[in-house]
Amino acid sequence: MFKRDWLKKKASKSCSPEDCAAYRQQRNLVNKEIRYAKKCFYKKQIEEASGDQRATWKILNDLMEKQSDSIMAIVS
């Protein structure tokens, strides 16, 4: 991520097509690695919660970024 941020700063200052292309390539690589890490994390969490429906649904709701009813009642 440090390299991506550094390339973004360099590309925005120079505005050269080569720097922009290098930044886009690094950005795409970082995004791909983040998606893969999230996939592995949630897959492991679901495997550990197998057999426990409550824990499984909690993980799935977290994955779908849904809030539970109790949290919604506090916020409202």
Image (cartoon, rainbow, N blue to C red):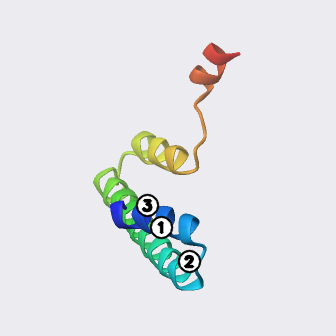
> Is 38 on the left-hand or right-hand side of 19?
left
Front residue of this view, candidates 31 and 11: 11
Q: Residue at x 37, y 45 (%)?
A: 52
Q: Earlier in the sequence, mark 2 or mark 3?
A: 3
Label 2 crowd bin: few (<14), some (14–19), many (20+), radius 10 Å: some
Q: Position of residue 25 (x, y in %)?
A: 48, 80
Q: How far across and how far down the image is residue 57, in percent?
A: 49, 45
Q: CA distance from mark 2 to mark 1?
A: 8 Å
> Which residue is at the front of the view, 40 or 34?
34
Q: Is 63 above or below relative to 69?
A: below
Q: What is the residue that sits farthest to the bottom in this orientation?
A: 18
Residue 41 coordinates in the image, percent (x, y): 34, 58
| Image disc number at residue 10 | 1
Of marks 1 and 3, which one's residue comes earlier in the chain? 3
Is 46 rendered above or below residue 32?
A: above
Q: Amino acid at mark 2?
A: Cys
Which residue matches tag 2?
Answer: 20
